[in-house]
Image (cartoon, helix red, strand yellow):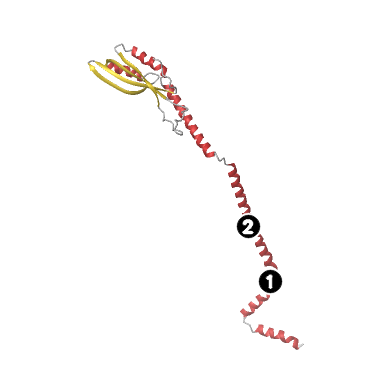
Amino acid sequence: MSAAKTPLAGVAARYNALSPREKAMVALALVFGPLLVGNSLFVDPPFAKARSLRQAVEQQRLGLADAKAQIANLEAQLQVDPDAPKKAELAGVQQKLLGADERLKKLSDSLVPPAEMNHLLEHLLAKHGGLRLVSLKTLAPESILTPPAKAEGKPAERQFDIFRHGIELRLEGGYFELLAYLDQLEKAEKKLLWGPVRLTVETHPKALLTVTVYTLAADRAWLSL
């Protein structure tokens, strides 16, 4: 019996010989040692496995998001019209043409039609008995648009054009009556575009007025005089 107690007595003697701090550390080791061993054997493995699973799930989630983004990109590419830039350019040109056509219409509505130019000039001249018509010359119609580019050495066909129709008018009379005629011509309800105006005095008090007036039209056909 004493032999069996000897190892325990030795352990007790060594324990009693420890300082209070060392005894506390031994006590903590006896209490938490089994817990640490149990944690490493039974708790840590499941937690490690859970962390591994979470990482795997996160990788899968990122991979799925990347795949969805690629699919969305491919679908967007499939929906893109390869002719979209050309169509957009064409739409822009058509819009400009519509705007130009609208402006041209407003201008045309405010101008004297070519067929009425002669009547307007003669009507105003009839109001000034002191003036004499020296000459009235029609000018060849001229396109005011830029010539189309040539295709394979041949002139390109123009689908739309605007022509300037002009008349050179020479009148003789008194200075102030000539100015009055020009003033009435400028204030007419239907307008004319003005070209060169030249006033010379050859025999006082008579003066010679040379004026060129224009109108615009989409038709090359000239008025009849």
The secondary structure type at the circle numbered 1 is helix
Query: Can the viewer see residue 29?
Result: yes
Residue 189: x and y in percent read 40, 19
How crowded pointer 2 is (Cα within 10 Å; few <14, some 14-19, many 20+) is rated as few
Q: Position of residue 129 (x, y in %)?
A: 31, 11
22 lies above or below 151: below
Residue 118 placement (x, y as % from top left): 38, 16
**Residue at coordinates 69% horizontally, 64% vertically from top-left?**
46
Residue underneath mark 2: 59
Q: Amino acid at mark 2?
A: Gln
Q: Total label count?
A: 2
Question: Residue at position x 30%, y 19% from top?
Answer: 210
Q: Which tag is nearer the camera, tag 1 or tag 2?
A: 2
Given residues 203 and 48, the one toward you in this image is 203
Label drawn at residue 35: 1
Query: Residue 68 or 49: which is nearer the viewer?
Result: 68
State the quadrant of the C terminus. Answer: top left
Q: Position of residue 126 (x, y in %)?
A: 34, 12
Check residue 169 in the rendering and tell me which mark sits there, or answer none: none
Left or right? Give the position of 124 relative to 159. Answer: left
Residue 175, can we see it? Answer: no
The span from disc 1 to disc 2 (Cα, nearest Å) is 34 Å
Q: Is residue 190 above or below residue 62?
A: above
In the image, 39 versus 89, the foreground residue is 89
In the displayed orientation, state which residue is furthest to the right: 1
